[in-house]
Image: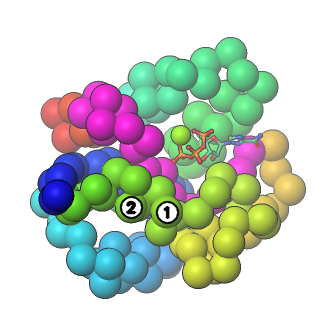
Amino acid sequence: MTQVQETLVLVKPDGVARNLSGEILRRIEAKGYSLVDIKLVQAERSLLAEHYAEHAGKPFFEPLVEFMESGQILALRVAGDRVIEGFRALAGTTDPTTAAPGTIRGDLGRDWGLKVQQNLVHGSDSPESAARELALWFA
Ligand code: RTP
Ligand code: MG
């Protein structure tokens, strides 16, 4: 049974700075997902703190917000059948060093040994997160 969903994908500042936006978009479109909306954003700290509210208080929270503030982010509203789960599979696991080859993080991600994983992309992890995050980034 088809289950059309929308998800929030972010190409993080490392992906934009490394000129990988096109390659990441290519993979999303090649999989059959559709772009509904797209914009380049220099995100405010308040938006990032809300976006990552579930990680507040963790040791990587501060470095994560600083990293996400360090350059432009490409925000994408993406639609498709089971796209929430599907994009997470395309992205690969969090740590780019061990993410499976064939995934965005596994093929393109580098762990520079910083305090936070610079892992190129974000994708919403549930329908509830997708609704919350899309409202934040595409208000
Ligand atoms: P995302 O939310 O970005 O799609 O990634 P995720 O679900 O795979 O990872 P999550 O656990 O939600 O963590 C959010 C982001 O925080 C950074 N992180 N660094 N120990 C670390 O160095 C660490 N743990 C998490 C990553 O940028 C991760 O994507
Ligand atoms: Mg997450």
Would you say 115 lies left or right of 34 here?
right
Q: Can you identify the residue that label 2 sits on?
A: 86
Mark 2 neighbour class, 10 Å CA radius: few under 14, some 14 to 19, many 20 or more: some
| Residue 49 located within the stretch drawn in magenta | no
Q: Does the magenta stretch include residue 117?
A: yes
| Amino acid residing under circle 2 | Gly
Percent of width and height locating residue 73: 42, 54
Q: For the point 64% across and 57% down, which residue is it?
A: 93
Q: Which residue lies furthest to the top in this view?
A: 57
Q: Residue 77 carries which label?
A: none
Residues rendered magenta in the picture: 116-133
Relative vertical location of residue 133 with respect to residue 10 in this rendering, above or below: above
The x, y position of residue 128, in whole percent, is 31, 29
Q: Which quarter of the rendered picture does the C terminus lie within? A: top left
The local crowd at label 1, few if under 14, some if 14 to 19, many if 20 or more residues have their Cα within 10 Å, is some
Q: Residue 34's quadrant in the figure?
A: bottom left
Give whichever of 91, 53 is nearer the camera. Answer: 91
Numbered badge on residue 89: 1
Frontmost residue, 13 versus 88: 88
- Residue at x 72%, y 22% (from the top left corner): 58
In contact (CB < 8 Å): disc 2 and disc 1? yes
Q: Is residue 17 above or below residue 122?
A: below
Q: Is residue 76 visible?
A: no
Q: Report, in whole angstroms, how far the alpha carbon at label 2 lies from the one at label 1.
A: 5 Å
Which quadrant does the N terminus fall into? bottom left
Instruction: Tell me residue 69's x, y (percent).
Output: 53, 42
* 76 vs 104: above or below: above
Q: Is mark 2 on a helix, strand or loop?
A: helix
> What amino acid does circle 1 point to?
Ala
Question: In x, y percent, where is residue 15?
Answer: 53, 67
Q: Residue at x 34, y 51 (%)?
A: 84
